[in-house]
Image (cartoon, rainbow, N blue to C red):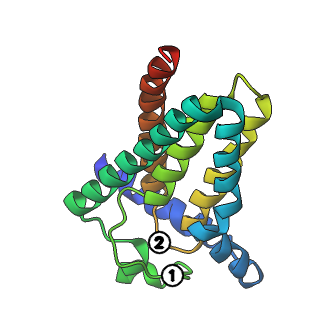
């Protein structure tokens, strides 16, 4: 059964990765870079302090940073423990996929997926009562995560697990944050 799941993971990667074409490469390389999302992070920072004001805003911001830190720590720890090679590091796959980057770290699970879903889920939890438009921020981690398949550095399972882990961490951390906010 495990071998079947790995085969499906590999086949889905090859299929999705091969949907890419050279005219779109620059766009997806831009999307996969964390620096490209700086305006979104500034927006998140602004709405935190606009809606929660100074003291509560500081608590929300600190918990968002803690959420991000825990997610990165768990991601890096898991990568070093599992040591799954990236698809573009597997000789049999390099002939089947388009690889646009070559990160030196391991593949499982995706830090792009875990951190972007953690940040976005936390923000959605914090602002869903202020505006339903906040749900549109989910577009960011979806694009950010898909970019990792497009450039050939992650299997779909790396991304799904990363998204799940990041989402769970965000829910737990926001629940703790909410209890603190309710006592302020």
Helix, strand or loop at label 1? It is loop
Number of disc labels: 2
Q: Position of residue 161 (x, y in %)?
A: 42, 47
Considering every residue shown, the one lying at the far top of the view is 183
Q: Could you give the CA–CA distance between mark 2 and mark 1, rounded to whole angstroms?
A: 7 Å
Q: Is 122 placed above or below 141 here? A: above
Q: Residue at the spot x=46%, y=65% of the render?
A: 154
Q: Position of residue 15 (x, y in %)?
A: 59, 66
Quarter residue 81 falls in: bottom left
The tag earlier along the polypeptide, 2 or 1, is 1
Q: Residue at the spot x=77%, y=83% of the render?
A: 23
Q: 10 Å neighbourhood of mark 1: few (<14), some, or many (≥20)?
A: few
Q: Quadrant of the N terminus?
A: top left
- Residue that mark 2 sits on: 153
Considering every residue shown, the one lying at the far left of the view is 81
Q: Is residue 149 left or right of residue 142?
A: left
Considering every residue shown, the one lying at the far front of the view is 54
Q: Position of residue 162 (x, y in %)?
A: 44, 49
Residue closer to the observer: 177 or 71: 177
Helix, strand or loop at label 2? It is loop
Q: Is residue 140 left or right of residue 117?
A: right
- Residue that mark 1 sits on: 101
Residue closer to the observer: 161 or 140: 140
């Amino acid at each position: 059964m495990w071998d079947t799941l790995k085969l499906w993971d590999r086949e889905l990667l090859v299929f999705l990765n091969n949907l890419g074409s050279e005219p779109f490469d620059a766009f997806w390389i831009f999307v996969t870079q964390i620096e490209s999302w700086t305006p979104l992070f500034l927006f998140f920072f602004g709405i935190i302090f606009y809606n929660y004001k100074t003291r509560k805003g500081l608590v929300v911001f600190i918990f968002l940073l803690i959420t991000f830190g825990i997610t990165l720590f768990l991601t890096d720890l898991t990568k070093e423990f599992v040591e799954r090679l990236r698809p573009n590091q597997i000789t049999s796959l390099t002939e089947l996929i388009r690889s646009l980057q070559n990160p030196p770290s391991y593949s499982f699970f995706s830090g792009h997926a875990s951190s972007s879903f953690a940040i976005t889920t936390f923000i959605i939890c914090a602002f869903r009562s202020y505006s339903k438009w906040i749900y549109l921020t989910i577009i960011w981690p979806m694009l950010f995560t898909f970019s990792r398949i497009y450039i050939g550095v992650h299997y779909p399972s790396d991304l799904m697990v990363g998204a799940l882990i990041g989402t769970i961490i965000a829910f737990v951390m926001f629940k703790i944050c909410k209890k603190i906010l309710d006592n302020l």
